[in-house]
């Protein structure tokens, strides 16, 4: 019974904590410059997660043309830049990565 009480209590606390920000932001409006800056947060977070994976090989920085992850990322970047959507970007990047792995 104590485990279920703990699960319910943790769920309630988590829900209240997360919903408090939604309620707070509904009552207050942010300045325009803050809203404009917040548009870049997802791209910055995604880059911070992906960049180390692409640029590191065996724990070392590898920015050479022999790093196939960089080449696959360039191919995916071109597809993304041309505006073909996130699904085609992911598919093309993975096919490029697998193809380069097969070649090398």
Image (spheres, rainbow, N blue to C red):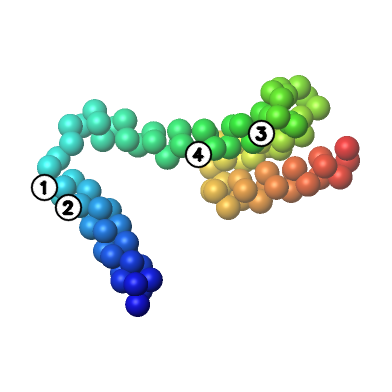
The quarter in which the N terminus is drawn is bottom left
| Mark 1 lies on residue | 27
Res 46 label: 4
| Number of numbered discs visible in the structure rendering | 4
The quarter in which the C terminus is drawn is top right
Q: Residue at x 29, y 32 (%)?
A: 36
Between 24 and 15, which is closer to the camera in this rendering? 15
Q: Are marks 2 and 4 in contact (CB under 8 Å)?
A: no
Upstream in sequence: badge 3 or badge 1: 1
Determine the secondary structure under disc 3: helix
Q: CA distance from mark 3 to mark 1?
A: 41 Å
Q: Is residue 44 visible?
A: yes
Res 54 label: 3
Q: Position of residue 13 (x, y in %)?
A: 26, 59
| Mark 2 lies on residue | 23
Other residues around mark 2 within 10 Å, as few (<14) / some (14–19) / many (≥20): few
Q: Position of residue 24 (x, y in %)?
A: 16, 47
Q: Are marks 3 and 4 in contact (CB under 8 Å)?
A: no
Q: Is residue 99 left or right of residue 43?
A: right
Q: CA distance from mark 2 to mark 1?
A: 7 Å
Between 59 and 72, which is closer to the camera in this rendering? 59
Upstream in sequence: badge 2 or badge 3: 2
Determine the secondary structure under disc 4: helix
Upstream in sequence: badge 3 or badge 4: 4
* Residue ranking furthest to the left: 27
Upstream in sequence: badge 2 or badge 4: 2
């Amino acid at each position: 019974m104590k485990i279920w009480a703990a699960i319910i209590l943790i769920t309630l606390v988590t829900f209240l904590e997360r919903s408090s920000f939604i309620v707070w932001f509904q009552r207050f409006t942010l300045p325009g410059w803050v809203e404009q800056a917040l548009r870049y947060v997802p791209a910055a977070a995604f880059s911070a997660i992906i960049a180390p994976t692409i640029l590191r090989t065996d724990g070392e920085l590898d920015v050479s043309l022999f790093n196939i992850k960089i080449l696959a990322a360039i191919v995916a970047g071109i597809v993304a830049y041309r505006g073909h959507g996130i699904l085609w970007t992911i598919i093309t990047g993975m096919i490029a990565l697998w193809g380069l792995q097969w070649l090398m």
